[in-house]
């Protein structure tokens, strides 16, 4: 008999609730354990998901839990946040004054639960919160990682697909660095089924586009979504669900994530968005792209920005 796949979701706001639904409707989880400090919100989300379960193509059980209950989970997705803090400022760092104390308030309980799986963090600022969780949980390297620039890369893929007419799945590209305004696209590493972007551009005008404008569109996509609905839901939930699926099935798939750097790209002591091999142990390898000198300098600048933002941790 195969082992029951138990997944936990911490925080059931707009993002957490959609993550739980994505995990259920895609058949990724056999059991969902939901945790939220708002007891009424927790009860409501559990009921709503149970109401949906009878018509899902896969069997899934849903229950409310507390942090000690999460010890049985194979994967936990951390989604704690207060999205309304971004209404005044389109800066994910605005959330840090809330999210870091929130994470610190329960990370020890999570550690004491005996949790020994993989934790995927969504909570912003993603790179900084992911590092905080990794330090607090004390799991082996790679077992805690963040969605990072995974969603931003999806936005770049979408923009390139619309611009060129080439299907998303035939495009290789990444957004690197901070999950924030300093991230960037390394254009030298963009290819279409092995054919570099620069080679396509020599003969096809569809590939001779304003790269700066496309990068700006990819960075700002989240704010377009936020402006009309005051949150983001589908894109980030699907990103996290895909990562959870990769981990549970040990796919060894390459996907951008917020991962700990220990010398890769000449950086150490921080988490940043980079392409990784994801598998049963979380981030199993950080892939170092052959960046141009200009792109490498830009990546270092992103990392310095993350380090600068980390200084605020001393005040919390």
Image (cartoon, rainbow, N blue to C red):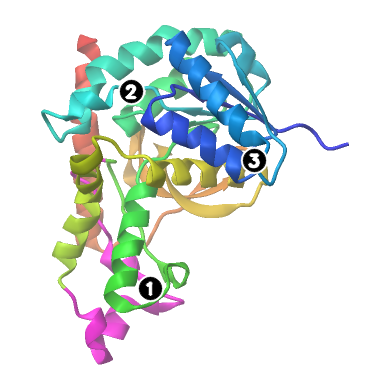
> Could you tell me how far apart the alpha carbons at marks 3 and 2 are, in whole angstroms?
27 Å
Residue 290, percent from left and from top: 36, 63
- On screen, residue 65 versus residue 39, left or right, reads right
Quadrant of image for the N terminus: top right
Asked if the residues shown at circle 3 and circle 2 are in contact, with their CB atoms under 8 angstroms apart, the answer is: no
Quadrant of image for the C terminus: top left
- Residue for point 38% across, 25% down: 13
Helix, strand or loop at mark 1: strand
Q: Is residue 105 above or below residue 45?
A: above
Helix, strand or loop at mark 3: loop
Nearer the observer, 87 or 137: 87
Q: Is residue 224 above or below residue 33?
A: below
- Residue for point 23% across, 16% down: 97
Residue 280 is marked as 3
Residue 41, percent from left and from top: 44, 16
Q: Is residue 65 visible?
A: yes
Residue 191 is marked as 1
**38 in magenta:** no
Q: Is residue 219 above or below residue 190?
A: above
- On screen, residue 231 versus residue 172, left or right, reads left
The crowd level at tag 2 (other Cα within 10 Å; few <14, some 14-19, many 20+) is: many
From the image, tell me which residue sits under label 2.
81
Magenta highlight range: 180-209
Residue 217 falls in which quadrant of the image? bottom left
Helix, strand or loop at mark 2: loop
* Disc nearest the viewer among 3 and 2: 2
């Amino acid at each position: 008999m195969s082992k029951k796949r138990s997944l936990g979701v911490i925080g059931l706001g707009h993002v957490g609730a959609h993550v739980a639904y994505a995990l259920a409707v895609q058949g990724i989880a056999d059991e969902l354990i939901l945790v939220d400090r708002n007891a009424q919100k927790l009860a409501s989300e559990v009921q709503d998901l149970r109401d949906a379960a009878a018509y899902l193509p896969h069997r899934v059980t849903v229950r409310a839990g507390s942090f000690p209950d999460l010890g049985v989970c194979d994967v936990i997705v951390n989604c704690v946040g207060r999205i309304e803090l971004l209404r005044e400022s389109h800066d994910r760092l605005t959330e840090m004054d809330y999210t870091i104390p929130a994470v610190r308030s329960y990370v020890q309980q999570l550690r004491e639960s005996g949790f020994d799986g993989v934790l995927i963090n969504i909570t912003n600022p993603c790179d900084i919160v992911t590092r905080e969780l990794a330090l607090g949980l004390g799991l082996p390297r790679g077992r805690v990682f963040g969605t990072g620039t995974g969603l931003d890369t999806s936005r770049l893929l979408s923009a390139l697909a619309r611009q060129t007419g080439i299907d998303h799945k035939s495009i290789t590209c990444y957004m690197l660095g901070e999950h924030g305004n300093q991230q960037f696209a390394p254009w030298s590493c963009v290819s279409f089924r092995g054919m570099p972007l620069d080679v396509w551009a020599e003969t096809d005008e569809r590939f001779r586009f304003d790269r700066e404008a496309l990068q700006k569109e990819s960075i700002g996509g989240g704010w377009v979504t936020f402006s009309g609905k005051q949150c983001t839901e589908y894109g980030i939930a699907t990103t996290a669900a895909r990562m959870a699926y990769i981990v549970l099935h040990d796919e060894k798939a390459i996907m951008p994530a917020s991962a700990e750097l220990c010398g890769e790209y000449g950086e150490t002591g921080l988490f940043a968005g980079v392409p990784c091999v994801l598998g049963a142990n979380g981030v199993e390898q950080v892939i170092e792209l052959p960046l141009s000198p200009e792109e490498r300098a830009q990546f270092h600048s992103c990392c310095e920005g993350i380090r600068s933002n980390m200084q605020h941790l001393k005040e919390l």
